[in-house]
């Protein structure tokens, strides 16, 4: 996601050349508080800059990651197929990550993260964990609107999203720190804003962090992408129709945020001179499809990934090794 609220100034470093700056000052992404912000389609072309590689700014990465999926759904309006498709996706990403050196591990966008490292010169592992106990449907009512956006009558502020995550961490004893990431999924027709930037008009999702009891909490705000398909939809639904098909659009921006959280969790690790993270530089770039899941609707059911043998249509991620966007390998 393009960090439009905390962006740093980067040096032209190549990923394979280790940074010599163990003692160097850690730089913050000059883009701002919202990191990995997936811009709405009409905004994306304004923020995607060139072919300069990501550079390292001395902060931590997620060497391994544990995923938690929170479905904040007071009215029970989220289609069960939407929830189950998202849960299956995280399960599939975790399953392929456990496949050692077999081809399955290298044939999706997550493997590209393994070229990046931290100050210990330890590279990121493609190692993700997700279990059914790490998915939770929260039916607590939404608070009073914390913001106003153009498309919805219910609008959650960034502070309210953070409060939701923090409350569940405390009540359920979930972990904090740099190894866990919390995705907050909200129903169709629910918006959000961070300052003056709002869902569907400016962004489709973002990742960020806050401190709770002295420990970092990594989280991502995941509005229902097909609330406004022209702004945040992928245009493809290999798992559709219905709720599962809507999940396909949300999953593309979910993958964007997940990969960016891994490579730049605090806005102090990997981004380019403009503050773009690995997902930002390839936003809405899907590469070549592998096929379609429906012979009757081949134009709208394309997939470009098989993860644990399930079909998905995900955006590409930036590879320093290729100086370009990739779907597989490094």
Image: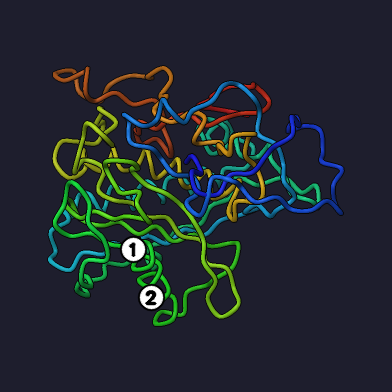
Element under label 2? helix
Residues under labels 1 and 2: Cα distance? Answer: 9 Å
Residue 65 located left or right of residue 233: right
- What's the residue at 64%, 25% (across, down)? 52
Q: How is the image coloured?
A: rainbow
Examine the rendered structure and indicate whether residue 27 appears above or below residue 228: below
Circles 1 and 2: CB atoms closer than 8 Å: yes
Q: Earlier in the sequence, mark 1 or mark 2?
A: 1
- What's the residue at 57%, 32% (across, down)? 106
Kindly indicate the quadrant of the structure image that contains residue 251.
top left
Q: Position of residue 306 (x, y in %)?
A: 41, 31
Q: Position of residue 157 (x, y in %)?
A: 32, 62
- What's the residue at 19%, 73% (across, down)? 141
Kindly indicate the quadrant of the structure image that contains residue 318.
top right
Examine the rendered structure and indicate whether residue 58 appears above or below residue 143: above
- Badge 2 is on which residue? 168
Residue 113 located left or right of residue 119: left
- Badge 1 is on which residue? 70
Element under label 1? strand
Nearer to me, 323 or 12: 12
């Amino acid at each position: 996601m393009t960090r439009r609220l905390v962006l740093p100034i980067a040096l032209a470093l190549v990923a394979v050349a280790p940074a010599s700056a163990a003692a160097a000052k850690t730089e913050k992404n000059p883009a701002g508080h919202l990191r990995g912000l997936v811009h709405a389609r009409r905004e994306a072309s304004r923020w995607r800059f060139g072919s300069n590689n990501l550079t390292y700014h001395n902060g931590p990465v997620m060497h391994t990651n544990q995923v938690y999926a929170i479905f904040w759904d007071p009215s029970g309006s989220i289609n069960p197929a939407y929830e189950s498709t998202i849960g299956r996706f995280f399960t599939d990403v975790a399953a392929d990550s456990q496949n050692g050196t077999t081809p399955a591990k290298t044939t999706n966008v997550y493997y590209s993260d393994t070229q990046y490292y931290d100050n210990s010169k330890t590279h990121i592992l493609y190692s993700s964990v997700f279990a059914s106990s790490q998915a939770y449907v929260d039916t607590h009512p939404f608070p009073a609107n914390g913001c106003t956006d153009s498309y919805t009558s219910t609008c959650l502020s960034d502070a309210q999203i953070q409060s939701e995550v923090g409350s569940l961490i405390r009540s359920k004893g979930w972990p904090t720190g740099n190894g866990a990431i919390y995705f907050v999924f909200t129903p169709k027709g629910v918006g959000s804003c961070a300052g003056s930037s709002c869902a569907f008009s400016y962004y489709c999702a973002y990742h960020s962090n806050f401190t709770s009891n002295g420990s970092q909490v990594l989280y991502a705000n995941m509005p229902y992408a097909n609330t406004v398909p022209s702004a945040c939809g992928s245009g493809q639904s290999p798992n559709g129709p219905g709720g599962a098909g809507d999940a396909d659009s949300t999953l593309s921006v979910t993958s964007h945020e997940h990969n960016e959280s891994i490579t730049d969790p605090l806005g102090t690790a990997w981004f380019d001179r403009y503050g773009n993270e690995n997902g930002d530089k390839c936003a809405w770039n899907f590469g070549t499809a592998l096929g379609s899941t429906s012979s009757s609707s081949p134009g709208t059911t394309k997939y470009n990934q098989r993860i644990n043998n399930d079909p998905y249509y995900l955006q590409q991620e930036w590879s320093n090794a290729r100086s370009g966007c990739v779907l597989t390998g490094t």
